[in-house]
Image (cartoon, rainbow, N blue to C red):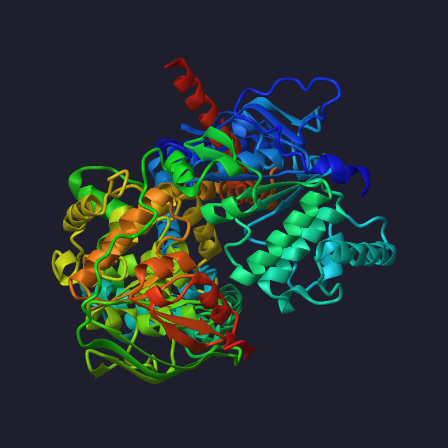
Amino acid sequence: MERLPRWADVFLVPFINLLLAFFVSGLVVLAVGEDPVKAVWVMLKGSLGSTAGLGYTLYYATNYIFTGLAVAIAFHARLFNIGGEGQAAIAGVGVALVLLAANWPHWMLALPFAIIGAGAFGAMWAAIPAYLQARRGSHIVITTIMFNFIAAAVMGFLLNGWLKSPRTQNAESLPFPPGAHLPTAHELLAPLGIGFSKSAPLNISFLLALLCAWLVFLLLWRTRLGYAIRAFGQSESAARYAGISAVRIIMITMLISGALAGMLSINVVMGEQGRLIKEFVEGAGFVGIAVALMGRSHPFGIVLAAILFGMLTQGGFELLWEMPNLSKEMVLVIQALIILFTGALDNMVRAPLERLFLYFNRRKEGAV
Amino acid sequence: MDSTTETGRRATAASSAPPAFPSSGSEPPAIELRGISKAFGPVQANKDITLSVARGAIHGIVGENGAGKSTLMSILYGFYRADAGEIFINGERREIHNSQDAIAAGIGMVFQHFKLVENFTVLENVILGAEEGALLRPSLARARDLLTTLAAEYELSVDPEALIEDLTVGHQQRVEILKALYRKADILILDEPTGVLTPAEADHLFRILRNLRDEGKTIILITHKLREIMDITDTVSVMRRGQMTATVKTAETGPEQLAELMVGRKVLLEVEKTPAHPGPAVLEIEDLRVTDESGVDRLKGISLQVRAGEILGIAGVSGNGQSELLEVLGGYRNASGRILLNGIPLDLSGRHSDGQSRRAAGIAHVPEDRQREGLIMEFAAWENIAFGYHNDPKYQKNTLFMDNRALREDTRQKMKHFDVRPPIPRLKARNFSGGNQQKLVLAREIERNPDLLLVGQPTRGVDIGAIEFIHKRIIELRDQGKAILLVSVELEEILSLSDRIVVMFDGRIMGERIPAETDERELGLLMAGVQNGETT
């Protein structure tokens, strides 16, 4: 017998978590003398109320889908990849190298190569911690955190040296050729007669993210490799018995995870910035952990959770704009509370809910 | 210790009749349970249980897995709260909400899996959680005195300063008993205490239990070994499907009757089999040696043969190299020496071999621990049927994808052949009972039609009804001319299933016997490392 019906597990628990998070956030907003109801309204309107807001929301969601998938696939092999941040950053270098290497005539030609560049560099950055875990037993949580710092340093070094644009004072690369520009939502929807904000950075990468979610689903639940990954994640001792190689699974899973995290740079570096800048990941690697937790490591859940976190990010910026009493840190606190409730405190809601369901089930049986 | 001995031997109060209030003058029972019920969701684990155990008696509780024995004891020890019912200890109504309450009521529990801190000494473990004051020294001194007294009184000797990790399993169990006695337990509950012991250790445990009883302690023994019940208990209760089906005096019953009460139908305790007709050797092992990660020699030169159409049983107390032998054969532990399968050498270095290559070579493996190795508990039954064989072309739709539908269909068939209940392929492995989990593993491995079947502890934690079925299936495979290597710590099982028996002790083979020409006593001595009256 499952303890909770599936719908409660998938929807009710996250929903209650979210309500709790909003409630506590509301207290915080109240404490600084603002109206919490108005704050929620501002966030909703700011993230969904206009095509510009929606464009930003989905742009952030695109990032979170990539990093969420990266964390989730590693979760399935019981690996905690906290290195999405660094993997995405280094992948940006891969994208920049590809796009600066030629005068790309059209994005359709540039995109596959940029994807290969991003994937290869992201995977490479994940490969070293993966190897250390698989062969040397160094804990992947520690090594991937370390590699985030190393990645930041590498980015600083490259963007102040080899990759630095001679045309500006800033630590950034030369702009990519115009042919490498990815179509935005505005450009894609205009031919269909749908008006979409010109300023929003949402671009075709969103579709790439959805495609990745679909591919991850197929990989995990329809292929031998996915089967082996999940089996290994559930029980290392059983995997040993079955002849599933730990080294192979750890390496392959982390390479895929790193490549997925790397896809973020397609959205940001290629799609939005058009050049490589230093801190373009902006914490999306870490948000991916919360997204994967809330999405229960399932691609479908991750897409939903990513959109929610996209709304939070975009709504948070609107909040700053509309409610001057709320500082940037305050918005961070609200986002952190939501991560805390949906991710870390999941069991706080789950356990009482399980008891409640048990109680009602028994009552029902008693009546029969 | 003077007056209690006289009243102590009365083991009469336990009867199947509803307990009446004790009339004045007669002593109230040590434990009395009235109408205990407990449900987990739709599963009624305990249903209106009434039980009365006299002071100074050894009371056995038998029942199949999932019959509700452990739940009942967990209620008594405060791990679960009963939905309904009352508990009386020495005639007094008690609310037991947690283990502290249980200890206060004088109840001590010895779990199947010991709850000891491995790198603490015996003394430290005994006082753990029962320290008096912030300083350890006075408590330790008091415990040391008490341990000396108890050791003399009950043959409970164990070195107070030894580290737990250095003790044998039998001694660790004594520490658990000492822990309970240190907390002034009058009622001692032991959950499957002999599962990990050699026959000699079990005998010693029973002596201790008898001594404790003679001093007026009340003992509840949970076990599935009917022989132990007959040996040591005064009264016995049988549970089936959450209900107490009978409580009888041990002297007035027998193993056949108890088995029937447990299962609800007549059970064959003896395995029916025809003599083996062994063919050529399928498996030949020569001078197999294994050294583990910490440099300990686990196998010290094992040589044996298994022929087609025979079952070779390996007897031994667990931890004497049997697991390592299975792991080497299963392809996931490296070794030196030689192993021939049908005359072809197997790679033992791990470079060209793993579980996959062994399966391809025709070895199927029912591992000793189905929950840790044989199954993925969170996977559905159909996913588990592919486990280890997920690369089999039969389960592939094309080069990219697995054929989950074919797999589910295959699972449905295998579940039917092996009478797995409930026959629902999408149910997770953990939702099956122990016996049905084991049948899933057996279905997967036996239906591969292997040349050699490795079977580890095929009936550990499996109920009597399923044991019969599993034994039958193993013998069927033998009669098809397959070679079977059986590892079991249950001597009865080894004796009844095997065509030849090899006893392992400390990574060596102590001797080979023919079941008809040996008995449990002789095997027990070999298992303890005694050869021709000498300890090795």
Residue closest to the eye, B167 or A269:
B167
Residue closest to the eye, B185 or A86:
B185
Residue B233 position in % (x across, y down): 56, 42
Q: Can residue A213 be seen in this view?
A: no
For residue A181, side relative to residue A48 (left or right) = left
Q: Quadrant of the N terminus of chain B?
A: top right
Please, is residue B210 above or below residue A194 in the view? below
Residue B163 position in % (x across, y down): 69, 66
- The residue that appears at 39% across and 66% down in the rendered structure is B518
For residue B366, side relative to residue B153 (left or right) = left
Please, is residue A346 above or below residue B285 in the view? above
Q: Quadrant of the C terminus of chain B?
A: bottom right
Please, is residue B239 above or below residue B418 in the view? above
Residue A90 position in % (x across, y down): 41, 69
Q: Quadrant of residue B359?
A: bottom left
Q: In which quarter of the image is residue A52?
A: top left
Residue extending furthest toward the top: A367
Please, is residue B479 above or below residue B434 in the view? below
Residue closest to the eye, B533 or A49:
B533
Q: Quadrant of residue A226?
A: bottom left
Residue closest to the eye, B235 or A139:
B235
Q: Is residue A8 visible?
A: yes
Residue A56 position in % (x across, y down): 38, 44
